[in-house]
Image (spheres, grey):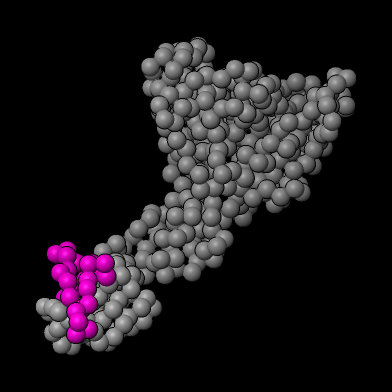
């Protein structure tokens, strides 16, 4: 492990620590201001993206009157003389005469002139071969525009695309969607004392964030390739600057792990200063998760990129991820600021004085309650593996059984929804 020390001077542009809610709002705003460009994608490639424009239907839905049952499309009073059959996908001839009928399949176009559809199970054939029965009073077909009219906005811009949205878009006649480009993310693991294989020992710990953080980022909708994960990076300032510069060449967001303090081998702050970065947030009044940061770099051509400094302790790093990276990515995707669900505490959760406490909890979805989990130290991951999210205990408060509190859900797979 290298022992090169970082410069003693503090970064000149570092803002003061921010409150947790203020930090979330601040990073969301800068993300939204730098929202990624819109791209056209085939429907099959849009899952997990975000709509860049409202989804509107190209025709009435349905586009023509369609039978909602198998049966007989009839004209006038019965009994009726069969004159044909119409199946889904066909265009029937008009029913021109009273007392006539055509056999019709569910989803088929109702012929012009039809006055009712008689369900097949409620019909009978007379000895003369006619169709008889009593149609129900309510029409047994779907009228054009019953679901939507041509040009009607069905889903607003900023909506995450999931299988339901994809199916709706197809039913509207779309072959492609205009969506926000997926953010490209990279991860730099700082700390050349870390092990990348085998069990920890002899004073060295296993890197848990290098394998885990890219998976979390993908659940937030990022594109992370194996080559985008680099480390451990040597504990020298030149190595940090070089690794950041290389990652920022292709990534919209670079996450780093460790090095967010000002210790003798913590080089992140000097590296950001060398690259001309500006702090959006530099430390947040939240526990666990100290210290975390988000910095912004802007090229002369207007391209904006971000560096999220995650603490080296694993659970603290995930707190930083849900606190800063999640709202930033929502802004970059043009999505609304994430709205936190609320749950009822089943057990007490202690406060952290002047700091926001993000407490790992398991949620009982049926009861709508949250129960704290064990093994939640900053360096621990056991509690995280059994949790659904973080209960938010605001500064100056503690959580008591029966209290309704916000919960920050852990990121889910694209298309999944929290409780």
Q: Quadrant of residue 282?
A: top right
Q: Is residue 202 magenta?
A: no
Is residue 113 in view?
no
**Start and end of the magenta stretch?**
113-140
> How many numbered callouts?
0
Residue at 46% from the left image edge and 23% from the top image edge: 370
Query: In the depicted view, which residue is nearer to us: 329 or 18?
Result: 329
Q: Position of residue 364 (x, y in %)?
A: 46, 27
Picture layout, residue 53 above or below residue 232: below
What quarter of the picture does the N terminus occupy? top right
Residue at 71% from the left image edge and 40% from the top image edge: 187
Query: In the depicted view, which residue is nearer to us: 103 or 47?
Result: 103
Q: Position of residue 295 (x, y in %)?
A: 62, 37
Residue at 40% from the left image edge and 26% from the top image edge: 367
Residue at 54% from the left image edge and 58% from the top image edge: 46
Is residue 312 in view?
yes
Picture layout, residue 288 above or below residue 63: above
What quarter of the picture does the C terminus occupy? top left
Picture layout, residue 272 above or below residue 349: below
Q: Position of residue 32 (x, y in %)?
A: 49, 46
Position of residue 210 in the picture relative to residue 345 (left or right): right
Q: Position of residue 255 (x, y in %)?
A: 67, 38
């Amino acid at each position: 492990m290298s022992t090169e020390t970082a410069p003693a001077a503090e970064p000149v542009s570092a803002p003061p620590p921010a409150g947790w809610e203020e930090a979330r709002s601040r990073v969301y705003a800068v993300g939204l201001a730098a929202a990624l460009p819109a791209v056209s994608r085939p429907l099959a490639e849009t899952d997990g993206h975000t709509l860049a424009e409202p989804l509107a239907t190209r025709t009435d839905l349905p586009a023509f009157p369609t039978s909602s049952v198998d049966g007989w499309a009839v004209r006038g009073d019965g009994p009726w003389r069969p004159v044909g059959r119409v199946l889904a996908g066909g265009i029937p001839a008009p029913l021109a005469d009273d007392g006539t009928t055509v056999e019709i399949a569910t989803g088929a176009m109702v012929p012009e002139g039809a006055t009712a559809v008689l369900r097949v199970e409620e019909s009978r054939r007379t000895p003369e071969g006619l169709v008889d029965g009593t149609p129900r009073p309510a029409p047994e077909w779907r009228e054009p525009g019953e679901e939507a009219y041509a040009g009607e906005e069905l889903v607003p811009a900023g909506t995450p695309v999931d299988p339901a949205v994809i199916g709706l878009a197809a039913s509207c006649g779309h072959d492609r969607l205009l969506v926000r480009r997926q953010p490209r993310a990279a991860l730099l693991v700082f700390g050349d004392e870390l092990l990348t294989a085998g069990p920890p020992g002899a004073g060295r710990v296993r890197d848990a964030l290098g394998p885990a953080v890219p998976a979390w980022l993908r659940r937030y909708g990022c594109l992370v390739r194996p080559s985008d994960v680099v480390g451990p990076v040597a504990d020298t300032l030149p190595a940090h600057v070089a690794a950041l510069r290389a990652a920022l060449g292709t990534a919209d967001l670079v996450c780093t792990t460790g090095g967010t303090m000002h210790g003798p081998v913590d080089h992140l702050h000097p590296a950001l200063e060398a690259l001309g970065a500006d702090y959006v947030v530099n430390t947040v009044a939240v526990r666990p998760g100290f210290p975390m940061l988000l910095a912004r770099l802007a090229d002369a051509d207007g391209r904006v990129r971000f560096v999220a400094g995650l603490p080296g302790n694993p659970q603290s790093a995930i707190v930083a991820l849900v606190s800063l990276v999640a709202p930033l990515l929502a802004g970059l995707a043009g999505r609304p600021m994430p709205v936190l669900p609320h749950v009822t505490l089943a057990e007490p959760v202690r406060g952290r004085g002047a700091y926001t406490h993000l407490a790992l909890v398991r949620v009982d979805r049926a009861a709508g309650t949250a129960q704290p989990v064990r093994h939640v130290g900053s360096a621990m991951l056991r509690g995280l593996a059994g949790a659904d999210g973080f209960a938010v205990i605001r500064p100056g408060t503690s959580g008591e059984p029966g209290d309704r509190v916000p919960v920050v859900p852990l990121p889910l797979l694209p298309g999944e929804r929290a409780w």
